[in-house]
Image (cartoon, rainbow, N blue to C red):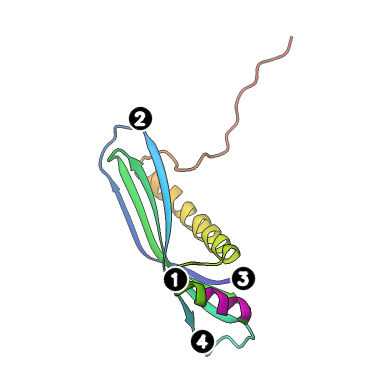
Amino acid sequence: MKTIGFNFTKINLEKMSDNLKNLKITTDVNILDVKELKSDFIKSSERLIGVRFEYTINYEKDIAFLKFCGNLIASVEAKQANEILNQWKDKKIPGEFRLNVFNVILRKSSLKALQLEEDINLPPHVPLPSFKQTEKKK
């Protein structure tokens, strides 16, 4: 799978409280639609698959939430495209394709989320690398 395009169609962010006591952060990725796309610009033996998604980050209990909606366009081999489209009729997605799509969504959305979390003074939803002081050996 090659990612050909990615865009957000909606970004919703709301902070309802500054009380971060007992903070719990949950995330969720939902695939809303999968369909074949036609293009006059790309001439290839591969086929284009469009994926419409929703990614949410929820700061519980009623502290804040972020919601990203968007589209991803992937180029896949014809055989794989048939498998993806056939399984989507039952609202299922083949494992390897699903893994690749989720990873692209998480990578792109998490970067944008980190910026927004910083802007409204929320803790990051993922642990960031940091240095820690070690004790000196005697």
Most extreme residue toward the left, as rendered?
16
Residue 90 is labelled as 1
Name the outermost residue toward the front. Answer: 90
The quarter of the picture where residue 26 lies is: top left
Q: Is residue 81 magenta?
A: yes
What's the residue at 60%, 26% (across, down)? 132
Q: Which mark is first along the chain, 2 or 1?
A: 2
In the image, what residue occupies the spot 60% across and 64% down? Answer: 96
The x and y percentages for residue 63 are: 30, 40
| Residue 43 in the image, given as x and y percentages of width and height | 61, 88
Packing grade of label 4 (10 A; few <14, some 14-19, many >=20) is few
What amino acid does circle 2 point to?
Answer: Asn
Q: Residues within 10 Å of mark 3 (few under 14, many from 20)?
A: some
Residue topped by disc 4: 39
* SS label for mark 2: loop
Q: How far apart are the two marked residues, 1 and 4, measured between alpha carbons?
A: 26 Å
Q: CA distance from mark 1 to mark 3?
A: 21 Å
Q: Is residue 65 left or right of residue 97?
A: left
Q: Residue at x 58, y 38 (%)?
A: 129
| Proximity of marks 1 and 4: CB atoms separated by less than 8 Å | no
- Label 3 sits on what residue type? Met
> Which quadrant would the C terminus be assigned to in this image?
top right
Task: Name which of mark 4 and mark 2 comes first in the sequence.
Answer: 2
Gap between marks 4 and 3, in whole Å? 17 Å
Q: Is residue 122 left or right of residue 93?
A: left
Which secondary structure type mostly characterizes the magenta part of the structure?
Answer: helix
Q: Earlier in the sequence, mark 1 or mark 3?
A: 3
Which stretch appears magenta?
79-85
